Image (cartoon, helix red, strand yellow):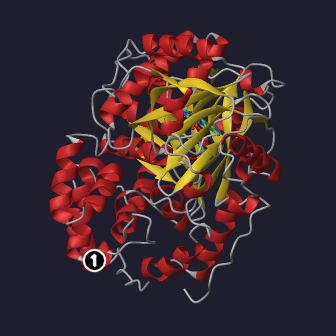
């Protein structure tokens, strides 16, 4: 397939068109504006500096900025490059927490599921799950139905639809490739699916829109101490390669698996408060697995719940849950992790006969959990904690993607108490995230008319919501940007231009792993595409080589072969 090379999006004429679309009050959240943000970080004094651009830090920054505080948010790598791009991408009540009797957690998460489907309906979308029950299962049919009735009740019966009990025959109709021998029955129920990296990015962008100074590739190397009180941080700009200080009245440590490192900048002898457990997912060709939709299953290996999730042309299977005390930067899937997941899914989809060579990508994340017994990772608490770890320093840890807004609220309440001002709740649950306003159906219709393609319209509205027209107008201004990036994947070149100009993508990895996430969907993890894109966007052969390294670390376990990038870009 012949690809037309798109023009350099940093080209002046294109940027001018984009600047005309911008809200007058705030600069665009783009690579070109980053130097101004660094200058602001260096020269202003902030009410609160947030360390960590995962879902929690981005959520805290948005909440604090919406309360009118002067906010800075710094992320050492890319937004969501830590745990927040390695989750199961579910916004869920947490059905399996019912087993531990954590009803309050399920109640809270169910409310959040509803809220997030309201403020970001384009990327938090209902997903129906099928839970089949087999002979001898740890959770028999009666127990499943009781749990699902409770699940509906804890959502105050306001979930998308209540659960629905099914016979074995009905299940086989819904999922024909599922094993039939031993199938007793089961049920369908609803949760929601999201794109975790995009949800995080939208919160970082919303924080920026609300007035926060937000920058990635800014690492905190130490804390500024006045006597023993934290008054800001020593920072390092990893792009300009220079150190500078950020002055702040309070500092929030939202660094997930890195929390204890940041705490120890203030209290070198602090004991560990966050326990990491590793979770691995694999992507397989959907037609090899044969699932029709999302399925919740119990692993035959150890009885744990795992998911088989539809994701375009791929099926995602996950997750494992094992204790992890290594460096967060190098966490990766091992051949044993992949083997566990393949054996688990194979047991239920007998026609698949999967082998490691079927695996398109495998990736791992670290759950930053609080307390609990490390010998039983499954039982570690999914609750969150907000603690004053040193004068001026508040640490927020634990929780999950689904409940980030609650974590943010509790954290900013603590910040306001520390600042000595009354806690004033932000409207984070009623104001839409970027692209979240308006009716999806109407947007899809308008997009289909303007783009001339229902499939492209659905794709753009799903990824960008009401901002689909801004992305598409780049393609209207320059036809080369309307060209698909890597057919049959639905992404187009305009999305790369948008990522650089409006979503602070600074590297090939920022684009291809998190904003236009082809890396886990293509067998070469996007290396061919990285080579093809590099020249148009000013990235060098060294940048492509860096992409190859990062993609290999993030998506290829030792067992998976990786192609090397082609030269000449
Ligand atoms: C396998 C798996 C599946 C999961 N599935 C789900 C799910 O389906 N639904 C759900 O609700 N939850 C899920 N979770 C939980 C959820 O993903 C996490 O709770 C959440 O992403 C943690 O976000 P965080 O912001 O605390 O951490 P992170 O996303 O790791 O963010 C911390 C950030 O801090 C940055 N940082 C660290 N040190 C510094 C420094 N010195 N200077 C500047 N920045 C720094 C890091 O680079 C990182 O980006 C899952 C977790 C895992 C591992």
The quarter in which the C terminus is drawn is: bottom right
Is residue 177 at least partly visible in the picture? yes
Left or right of 146, for residue 549 = right
Residue sitting nearer the eye, 388 or 541: 541
Give the class, few, some or many, for how many residues have Cα within 10 Å of label 1's Cα (few <14, many ≥20). few
Residue holding disc 1: 12
The quarter in which the N terminus is drawn is: bottom left
Residue sitting nearer the eye, 121 or 382: 121
Residue sitting nearer the eye, 489 or 266: 489
User: How far from the left and from the top, in percent, is residue 341?
Assistant: 72, 44
User: How far from the left and from the top, in percent, is residue 542?
Assistant: 63, 78
> Extreme bottom residue here?
568
Give residue 190's quadrant in the image.
top left
Q: Residue at x 60, y 66 (%)?
A: 525
Write down which quadrant ligand 1 falls in. top right
Left or right of 290, for residue 487 = left
Q: Residue at x 15, y 61 (%)?
A: 449
**Does residue 7 lie above or below 457 as drawn?**
below
Left or right of 474, for residue 497 = right
User: What element does badge 1 sit on?
Assistant: helix
User: How far from the left and from the top, in percent, is residue 334?
Assistant: 79, 51
């Amino acid at each position: 397939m012949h690809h037309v090379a798109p023009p350099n999006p940093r080209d002046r004429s294109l940027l001018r068109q984009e600047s005309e679309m911008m809200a007058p009050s705030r600069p665009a959240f783009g690579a070109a504006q980053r130097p101004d943000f660094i200058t602001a970080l260096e020269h202003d004094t902030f009410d609160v500096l947030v360390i960590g651009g995962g879902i929690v830090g981005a959520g805290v920054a948005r909440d604090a900025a919406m309360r009118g505080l002067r906010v800075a948010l710094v992320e050492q790598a890319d937004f969501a490059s830590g745990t927040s791009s390695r989750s199961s991408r579910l916004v869920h009540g947490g059905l399996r927490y019912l087993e531990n009797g954590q009803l309050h957690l399920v109640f809270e998460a169910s409310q959040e599921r509803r809220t997030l489907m309201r403020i970001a309906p384009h990327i938090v979308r209902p997903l129906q799950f099928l839970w089949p029950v087999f002979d001898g299962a740890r959770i028999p049919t009666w127990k499943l139905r009781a749990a699902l009735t409770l699940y509906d009740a804890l959502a105050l019966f306001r979930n998308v639809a209540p659960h629905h009990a099914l016979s074995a025959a009905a299940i086989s109709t819904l999922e024909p490739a599922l094993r039939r021998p031993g199938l007793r029955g089961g049920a369908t129920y609803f949760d929601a699916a999201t794109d975790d990296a995009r949800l995080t990015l939208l919160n970082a962008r919303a924080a920026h829109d609300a007035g926060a100074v937000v920058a990635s590739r800014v690492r905190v190397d130490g804390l500024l101490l006045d006597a023993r009180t934290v008054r800001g941080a020593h920072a390092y700009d990893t792009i300009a390669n220079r150190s500078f200080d950020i002055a702040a009245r309070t500092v929030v440590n939202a660094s997930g698996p890195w929390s204890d490192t940041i705490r120890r900048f203030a209290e070198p002898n602090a004991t560990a408060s966050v326990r990491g457990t590793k979770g691995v997912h694999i992507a397989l060709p959907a037609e090899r697995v044969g699932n029709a939709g999302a399925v919740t299953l119990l692993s035959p290996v150890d009885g744990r719940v795992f998911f088989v999730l539809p994701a375009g042309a791929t099926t995602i299977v996950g997750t494992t849950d094992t204790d992890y005390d290594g460096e967060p930067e190098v966490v990766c899937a091992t051949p044993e992790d992949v083997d566990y997941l393949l054996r688990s899914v194979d047991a239920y989809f007998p026609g698949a006969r999967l082998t490691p060579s079927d695996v398109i990508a495998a990736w791992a994340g670290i759950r930053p959990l609080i307390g609990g017994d490390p010998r039983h990772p499954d039982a570690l608490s999914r609750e969150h904690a907000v603690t004053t770890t040193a004068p001026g320093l508040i640490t927020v840890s634990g929780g999950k993607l689904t409940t980030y807004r609650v974590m943010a609220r509790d954290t900013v309440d603590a910040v306001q108490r520390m600042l000595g001002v009354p806690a004033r709740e932000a409207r984070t649950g009623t104001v839409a995230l970027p692209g979240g306003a308006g009716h999806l159906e109407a947007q899809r219709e308008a997009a289909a008319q303007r783009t001339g393609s229902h499939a492209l319209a659905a794709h753009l509205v799903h990824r960008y919501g009401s901002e689909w027209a801004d992305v598409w107008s780049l393609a209207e201004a320059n036809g080369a940007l309307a060209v698909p990036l890597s057919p049959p994947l639905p992404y187009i070149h305009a999305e790369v231009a948008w990522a650089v100009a409006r979503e602070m993508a600074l590297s090939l990895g920022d684009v291809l792993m998190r904003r236009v996430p082809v890396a886990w969907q293509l067998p070469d993890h996007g290396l061919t595409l990285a080579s093809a894109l590099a020249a148009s966007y000013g990235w060098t052969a060294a940048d492509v080589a860096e992409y190859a390294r990062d993609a290999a670390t993030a998506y290829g376990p030792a067992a998976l072969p990786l192609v090397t990038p082609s030269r000449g870009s």
